[in-house]
C-alpha cells in the first residue's frame, strides 16, 4: 500500500510540474535616431498546449522553406499585430525584418524578433506607439535615445505599454 501511495504521489507531482505554463511575452524597444525611429519587438509563444502547437509547426517548418516562412509570418503577426504606430497622427506601415528564434536559445520555445524602421523627413515629427485595446499580453517597454538630443519622449518612460496611453516620441 505504501509503495502504491508513493507511486501515486510521484505521478501527481510530475503532473503538477508539467501543468506549469509560461504566458506569451512581448517586449518592445524603441530607439530614436537623428533621422529615424527603430522599433524592435520580440514575442515568445506561451508554454503549454498552445506553445506545443507552435513547436510542432516549427519542427515541420524547419524542413521546408514555405513552412518556415509561414511560421515566421504567424509569429510576426502575433508580435506586431496589436501595435499601433502613427507618425504625425497618421497610421504608418514601417519597413520590417523578421527573425525566427528560440527563447531561451535551444529550448524549443519559439520566439520571433521583428525590426521596424521608420525613416523621417527633415522637420518636427511625433511618433506614437501604442497597443490595441484588449491586448491580452503584458508588453514590456524600453526607450533608447541615439538621436544626439534631437528626440525626446513626451511623457515619462513607462516600463509596460498601456493600451489607453501610447508612448509619444518627438523630434
Image: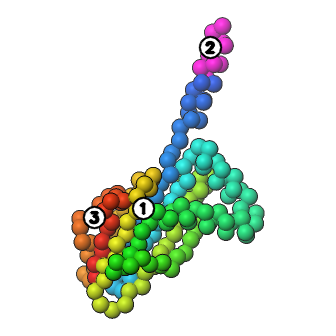
Seen at 38% across and 86% down, the residue is 120
Seen at 56% across and 65% down, the residue is 76
Residue pointed to by mark 1:
132
Disc 2 versus disc 1: nearer the observer: 1
Q: CA distance from mark 1 to mark 3?
A: 19 Å
Q: Is residue 67 left or right of residue 51?
A: right
- In the displayed structure, 25 sits above or below 63; it is above
Residue that sits furthest to the right in the current view:
63
Residue pointed to by mark 2:
5
Q: Specify the principal SS of the magenta part.
A: helix
Quarter assignment of residue 48: top right
Magenta-colored stretch includes residue 61: no
- In the displayed structure, 79 sits above or below 2; it is below
Q: Which residues are magenta?
A: 1-10
Quarter assignment of residue 166: bottom left
Q: Which mark is residue 157?
A: 3
Give the percent coordinates (x, y) of residue 46: 54, 49
- The first of marks 1 and 3 along the sequence is 1
Image quarter of the N terminus: top right
Quarter assignment of residue 59: bottom right
Magenta-colored stretch includes residue 4: yes
Q: CA distance from mark 2 to mark 3?
A: 54 Å
Residue 167 visible in the snapshot: yes
Q: Is residue 118 left or right of residue 152?
A: right
Amino acid at each position: 500500500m505504501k509503495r502504491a501511495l508513493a507511486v501515486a504521489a510521484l505521478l501527481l507531482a510530475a503532473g503538477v510540474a508539467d501543468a506549469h505554463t509560461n504566458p506569451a511575452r512581448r517586449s518592445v524597444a524603441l530607439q530614436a535616431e537623428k533621422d529615424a525611429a527603430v522599433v524592435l519587438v520580440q514575442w515568445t509563444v506561451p508554454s503549454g498546449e498552445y506553445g506545443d502547437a507552435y513547436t510542432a509547426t516549427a519542427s515541420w517548418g524547419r524542413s521546408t522553406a514555405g513552412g518556415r516562412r509561414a511560421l515566421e509570418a504567424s509569429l510576426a503577426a502575433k508580435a506586431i499585430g496589436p501595435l499601433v504606430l502613427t507618425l504625425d497622427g497618421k497610421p504608418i506601415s514601417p519597413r520590417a525584418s523578421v527573425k525566427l528564434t528560440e527563447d531561451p536559445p535551444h529550448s524549443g520555445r519559439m520566439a520571433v524578433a521583428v525590426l521596424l524602421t521608420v525613416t523621417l523627413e527633415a522637420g518636427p515629427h511625433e511618433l506614437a506607439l501604442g497597443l490595441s485595446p484588449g491586448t491580452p499580453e503584458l508588453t514590456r517597454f524600453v526607450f533608447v535615445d541615439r538621436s544626439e538630443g534631437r528626440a525626446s519622449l513626451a511623457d515619462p518612460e513607462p516600463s509596460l505599454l498601456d493600451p489607453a496611453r501610447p508612448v509619444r516620441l518627438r523630434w
